[in-house]
Image: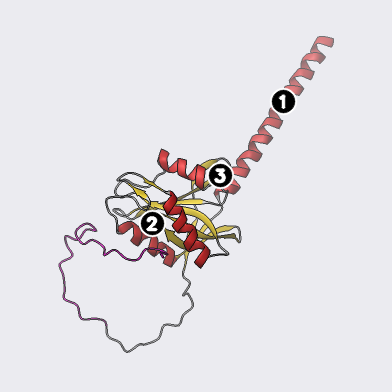
Amino acid sequence: ARMKSHICSLVTKAQSLAHSRQAMETRDEMAKHRARVTPVVIDCEVARRVRQHAHSHMKTEVCGVLIGSNRDDAVHVDACIAGQSAAQAGTHVTFTQDTWEHIYKVKDAEYPEARIVGWYHSHPGFGVFLSDHDTFIHRNFFSAPEQIAWVYDPHSDEEGFFGWAADCIERVARISFTDARGGEESRETHRPEPDLPLEDDSAWTPQSRPYKRPPACSVS
């Protein structure tokens, strides 16, 4: 009887430990889930400038930083600064000391109250993911919990965002775009659309009609 009671006691302790471990794992999963679902909200003008910057270099990567704030339980991207003097190559890009000096000069002058909430870079022709080099940059220069990485492929127009979920970097699931000019009334302007010659678009590709290089993001 004493042996049976001892065995029952051991079984009860083992079950209690198992339940405690399961509860801890559940709390960890819930914490990660809360980190994952934090949405990203991007101004449409920022998206246009980032994409144009990428389209201006169809063979090499470009980069820059995202400016904004963390408010209303979301990361808001309100502006961007192009990474001038970055070390560019076909398959990677690096923020140099000159790049950071330019970024902080523009930020201090134009966005003194805002924060750097992440970075962007292009993957011309090889899809959306974070390479080992990209992951190194994100872990060492954009390690704050709210900071994100935006990857854009100008060949396919595919894009994706990556952010922190606890100590891991995961793809962001909830992304939305806002228009700062939303609510403007649309009125008749009495201006006709321009009379442009018709063109044969049957063989059109982004490479066959390259973009003109625009002033991308904020530069000084």
Residue 49 disc label: none
Q: Whole-percent x and y of residue 151?
A: 40, 51
Amino acid, disc 1: Gln
Q: Mark 3 points at which residue?
A: 165
- Given residues 211 and 182, the one toward you in this image is 211
Crowding at mark 1 (Cα within 10 Å: few <14, some 14-19, many 20+): few
Q: Distance between the residues labelled 3 and 1?
A: 30 Å
- Going by the image, does 9 lie left or right of 196? right
Kindly check if marks 2 and 3 are in contact, taking CB atoms under 8 A apart as contact.
Answer: no
Under mark 2, the amino acid is Gln
In the depicted structure, whether residue 8 falls above or below residue 29: above
The label number, if any, that marks residue 84 in the structure image: 2
- 56 or 84: nearer the eye? 84
Element type at mark 3: strand
Residue 32 versus residue 81 in the image, above or below: above
The mark closer to the camera, 3 or 1, is 3
Q: Which residue is drawn at 26% across and 63% down?
A: 211
Marked residue nearer the N-terminal end (2 or 3): 2
Q: As displayed, is residue 141 above or below residue 70?
A: above
Instruction: Say if the magenta span includes residue 196.
Output: yes
Number of labels in the image equals 3
Q: What stretch is highlighted in magenta?
A: 193-220
Alpha carbon distance from label 2 to label 1: 60 Å
Q: Is residue 127 left or right of residue 197?
A: right
